[in-house]
C-alpha cells in the first residue's frame, strides 16, 4: 500500500469532493481509499491498485477541471514568494468580471437609458453598443474562468452540477439576446464561489491561528558547553534545557526542571485560569508563561507536541463526514438533475402545449436553472461543521470528526469512570494496617517492591508513601500482573502478592479479622490493597482519591443539559463506589468491574438509551469507550494514548466541558438545520415565482448569492461562540 498526498486547486466545496470521488475513486480501487482535507484543499490516496501513480491521479483530477499538485511540491512552492495574482487568482477574475460588467452597463445605459439597459430590452433601434457587447463577453469569460472546465466535465459525464447549471443559464441568456443578464449571472456566481472559498479560508485561518501559537524560535542550553543558543524549534533536540522568560510563549512540550511560575494553558486545554507549575510539572507548546522565568527539559520534537497533534487531529476531522453532510450530498445528487428536468419542462411544455411565447418560458426555464443551483445548500453544512470543530478546539475540546460532533447532540446517557474523571486521579495512602507480626515499615517495603513495575494510580500512591517514609526496597523478581486484581512476584526468593479484596478471596487467606477491617475501610470509601505471602496476610493498605471540586456541579449541568442517566463505573470496591457516587450526585454506580465488565455495562446502557458516552482516561477504559456511541477522554493534554484512543478528547481535567460539548453540538445541529431550511425554502419560493412568470434572472442569482451569504455567515457564527465554562 502506498500513500500519496496532493494539493487540489479548486477544492473548496463538498460537491467538488463528490466529483473527485467519481473520477479518482476507481483509479484508487474505491472511495474508501480516498481522504479529503477540505480546509487545506488536500487529497490523500491510500492504495495498492495497479496504475495508481501520482501522474495518473494528477491526470484524473485535471479531467474534472481542477488541478492536483503533489503535496511536497506544493509545500516547497509555498515557501517561495508568490505573485499577488497567483495568491488571489479567484478574486482577480471576479474583479475583472465585475469591472467589465460595470463598464459595459454604463456604456449601454448612456446609449439607451439605465432602465432599458437594466431590463435588457432589445426593441428595434436599441441595438447593443459594440463596446458593451465586448465588456459583457469579457465579464462572462472571466466570471466563468474557474466554472467552465468543471461544467465541461459535468456535461461529458452526464452528471449535472451547479457549474453546468450556471453555464447553461449564461449560454441560454445569450441565445435570447439578454447580454446584460448573462454577464450578471456569470459575475454573481463567481462572487458566490469566491465567498464560498473565503468561508473555507476563514475556517482554515482559524486553524492556522492555532499553529501560530507556538513560537518559531527557542533558546536552549547547549549540552556540550553550556552556552545559550537560539534556533528554530524544529532544530531543537529532545532532552535539552529550554529557557522561558516572563510573558513568553512556551516553544515546545517538556517537564519543568528549574523555577516556578503560572501558565495560561487556554490554547491547549481551554482553562480560563492560569495553572501553577512547579518542578516536574508538564508544560505545553503554545501556552503563555506569566510571571516567573523557568527552565524545562524538552520531551517531544516540534512535530509531535500536544499542540501539533491537536492541529493535525482537527484537520483530519474533515474526512469524517457528519450524517447531515452525507444527507446533503445524497440529496444534491438527485436534486440537481431533477431541477434541470423541471427547467426543461418549464421552457418547453407551455409553448408546446398551450402555444405560449417561446422566449418568455425559455427565459423562465433559465431562471429555474439559476435558482436551482445547490451552492447554498451544499456549502451550508461543511462550513458549519468546520466552524463547530474549530470552536470546540479553541475551548479545549478536540473532536475527531463531524460524525462525533453530531453524535454528542443525541446523547441520552453517560457513563463516567471514577479515577481521573470524577476524582483527581492521584490517590494517596490513608491507612497502613500491619497484621500477623509485621510492621508498617515491612508492609511498605513489600508493597513498594510489588508495585514498582506498575503504572496504576494506586501503585504510584504506595510508591510515593514509601519514598516519603525513606523505605529502601529490594526489586521484585518474576513479576506478573493479575489483570484487574493485582500482581504477584518473588521478593528475596519468597512468593508475595498484592491486590484487591477479590484477589484475597481467590488466595483463600481471608480471616474474620481481615474481612472486618477491610470492610470498614471500604465502607469509608477507601480502596484496600491486601499484601500477602504463601503463608498469611501481611497487612492492608488503604488508598483514597478525592472528588474533584467541580465534579458534582458538572453532573448537575449534565442533567440540566438533558442527560437522562449518569452512571459511575469503577474497578474499585463497593464502598468506594458508593461514597464517590453519593458525593458526585450520579444516578447509580457499578463497582469492582473488570474492563470486560465495563463493556457489558455500556452494552446494557446502549440497549436502554441507544446513545451513550463513556468518559474515561482513554487507556484503561479503551474497550468500553470503543463500545459506546462516543468515547471521551479526560485530561488528554500530554497524553498521546488518550488523544489517539478517544473520539473526543477533553484537553483539561474539567468535567464541566461535557455539558458545554453537548450544548455546542446541539447549537451546531440547529445552525445546520436553519441553513438547510432557509436554502431550500428560498429556492422553493423563487421556483414558484418562476413558474408563475414573475421571476427574473438577476433576481434569481441575487437570491442565490444572498442565500449563500446567509448560510455562510450563519455557520461562521459558531467560530465566535464562547464557552459557558470560561472560554470558547
Image (tube, rainbow, N blue to C red):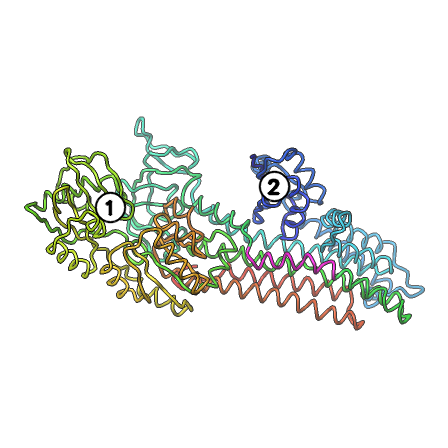
Q: For mark 2, what is the residue?
A: 7
Q: Quadrant of residue 297?
A: top left
Q: Main secondary structure of the magenta part?
A: helix
Please give the name of the residue rendered at 61% of the width and 36% of the height, measured from the top-left corner.
70
Report the quarter where the C terminus lies: bottom left
Please report the bounds of the magenta region as a residue range: 322-338
Reply yes or no: does residue 336 show up in magenta: yes
Nearer the viewer's eye, disc 2 or disc 1?
1
Image location of residue 61, percent across then percent down: 68, 42
Q: Is residue 603 left or right of residue 679?
A: left
* Quarter assignment of residue 73: top right
Q: Which one is nearer the viewer's eye here, 71 or 193?
A: 71
- The answer to whether the residues at label 2 and label 1 have Cβ atoms under 8 Å apart is no
- Residue lying furthest left: 437
Judging depth in this view, the residue of 653 and 647 nearest the camera is 647
- For label 1, the SS is strand
For the question of whether residue 241 can be seen, the reply is yes
Which residue is at 66% across, 66% downward? Answer: 680
Label at residue 486? 1
Residue 648 locus on image (x, y percent): 43, 53
Amino acid at each position: 500500500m502506498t500513500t500519496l498526498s496532493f494539493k487540489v486547486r479548486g477544492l473548496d466545496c463538498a460537491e467538488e469532493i463528490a466529483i473527485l470521488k467519481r473520477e479518482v475513486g476507481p483509479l484508487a480501487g474505491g472511495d474508501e481509499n480516498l481522504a479529503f482535507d477540505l480546509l487545506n484543499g488536500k487529497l490523500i490516496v491510500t492504495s495498492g491498485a495497479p496504475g495508481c501513480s501520482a501522474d495518473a491521479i494528477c491526470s484524473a483530477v485535471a479531467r474534472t477541471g481542477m488541478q492536483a499538485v503533489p503535496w511536497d511540491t506544493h509545500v516547497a512552492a509555498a515557501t517561495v514568494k508568490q505573485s499577488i495574482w497567483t495568491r488571489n487568482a479567484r478574486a482577480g477574475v471576479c474583479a475583472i468580471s465585475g469591472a467589465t460588467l460595470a463598464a459595459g452597463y454604463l456604456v449601454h445605459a448612456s446609449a439607451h437609458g439605465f432602465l432599458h439597459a437594466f431590463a435588457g430590452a432589445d426593441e428595434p433601434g436599441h441595438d447593443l453598443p459594440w463596446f458593451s457587447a465586448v465588456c459583457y463577453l469579457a465579464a462572462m469569460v472571466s466570471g466563468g474562468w474557474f466554472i467552465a472546465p468543471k461544467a465541461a466535465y459535468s456535461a461529458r459525464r452526464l452528471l449535472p452540477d451547479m457549474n453546468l447549471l450556471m453555464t447553461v443559464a449564461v449560454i441560454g441568456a445569450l441565445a435570447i439576446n439578454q447580454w446584460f443578464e448573462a454577464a450578471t449571472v456569470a459575475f454573481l456566481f463567481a462572487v458566490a464561489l469566491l465567498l464560498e472559498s473565503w468561508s473555507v479560508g476563514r475556517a482554515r485561518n482559524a486553524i492556522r491561528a492555532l499553529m501560530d501559537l507556538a513560537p518559531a524560535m527557542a533558546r536552549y542550553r547547549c549540552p556540550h558547553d553550556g552556552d545559550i543558543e537560539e534556533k528554530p524549534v524544529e532544530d531543537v533536540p529532545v532532552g535539552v534545557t529550554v529557557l522561558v522568560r516572563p510573558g513568553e510563549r512556551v516553544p515546545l512540550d517538556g517537564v519543568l526542571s528549574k523555577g516556578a511560575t503560572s501558565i495560561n494553558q487556554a490554547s491547549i486545554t481551554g482553562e480560563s485560569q492560569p495553572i501553577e507549575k512547579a518542578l516536574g510539572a508538564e508544560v505545553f507548546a503554545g501556552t503563555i508563561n506569566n510571571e516567573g522565568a523557568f527552565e524545562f527539559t524538552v520531551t517531544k520534537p516540534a512535530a509531535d507536541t500536544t499542540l501539533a497533534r491537536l492541529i493535525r487531529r482537527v484537520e483530519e476531522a474533515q474526512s469524517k463526514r457528519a450524517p447531515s453532510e452525507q444527507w446533503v450530498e445524497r440529496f444534491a445528487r438527485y436534486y440537481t438533475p431533477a431541477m434541470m428536468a423541471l427547467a426543461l419542462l418549464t421552457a418547453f411544455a407551455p409553448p408546446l402545449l398551450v402555444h405560449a411565447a417561446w422566449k418568455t418560458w425559455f427565459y423562465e426555464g433559465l431562471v429555474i436553472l439559476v435558482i436551482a443551483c445547490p451552492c447554498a445548500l451544499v456549502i451550508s453544512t461543511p462550513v458549519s461543521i468546520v466552524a463547530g470543530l474549530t470552536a470546540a478546539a479553541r475551548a479545549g475540546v478536540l473532536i475527531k470528526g463531524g460524525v462525533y460532533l453530531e453524535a454528542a447532540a443525541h446523547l441520552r446517557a453517560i457513563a463516567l469512570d471514577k479515577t481521573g474523571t470524577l476524582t483527581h486521579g492521584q490517590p494517596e495512602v490513608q491507612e497502613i494496617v500491619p497484621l500477623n507480626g509485621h510492621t508498617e515499615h515491612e508492609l511498605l517495603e513489600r508493597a513498594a517492591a510489588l508495585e514498582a513495575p506498575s503504572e496504576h494510580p494506586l501503585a504510584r500512591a504506595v510508591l510515593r508513601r514509601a519514598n516519603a517514609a525513606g523505605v529502601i526496597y529490594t526489586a521484585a523478581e518474576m513479576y506478573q500482573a493479575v489483570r484487574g486484581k493485582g500482581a504477584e512476584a518473588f521478593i528475596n526468593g519468597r512468593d508475595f502478592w498484592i491486590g484487591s479484596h477479590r484477589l484475597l478471596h481467590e488466595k483463600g487467606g481471608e480471616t474474620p479479622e481481615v474481612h472486618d477491617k477491610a470492610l470498614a475501610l471500604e465502607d469509608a470509601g477507601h480502596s484496600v490493597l491486601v499484601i500477602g505471602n504463601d503463608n498469611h496476610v501481611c497487612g492492608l493498605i488503604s488508598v483514597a482519591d478525592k472528588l474533584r471540586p467541580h465534579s458534582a456541579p458538572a453532573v448537575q449541568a449534565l442533567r440540566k443539559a438533558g442527560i437522562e442517566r449518569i452512571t459511575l463505573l469503577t474497578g474499585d470496591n463497593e464502598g468506594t463506589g458508593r461514597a464517590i457516587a453519593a458525593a458526585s450526585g450520579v444516578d447509580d454506580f457499578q463497582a469492582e468491574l473488570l474492563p470486560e465488565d465495563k463493556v457489558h455495562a455500556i452494552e446494557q446502557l446502549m440497549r436502554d438509551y441507544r446513545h451513550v458516552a463513556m468518559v474515561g482516561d482513554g487507556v484503561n477504559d479503551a474497550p468500553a469507550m470503543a463500545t459506546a456511541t462516543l468515547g471521551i477522554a479526560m485530561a488528554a493534554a500530554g497524553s498521546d494514548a488518550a488523544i489517539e484512543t478517544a473520539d473526543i478528547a477533553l484537553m483539561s481535567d474539567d468535567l464541566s466541558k461535557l455539558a458545554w460539548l453537548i450544548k455546542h453540538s446541539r447549537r451546531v445541529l440547529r445552525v445546520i438545520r436553519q441553513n438547510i431550511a432557509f436554502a431550500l425554502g428560498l429556492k422553493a419560493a423563487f421556483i414558484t415565482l418562476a413558474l408563475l412568470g414573475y421571476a427574473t434572472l438577476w433576481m434569481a442569482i441575487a437570491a442565490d448569492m444572498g442565500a449563500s451569504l446567509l448560510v455562510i455567515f450563519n455557520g461562521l457564527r459558531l467560530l465566535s461562540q464562547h464557552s459557558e465554562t470560561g472560554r470558547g
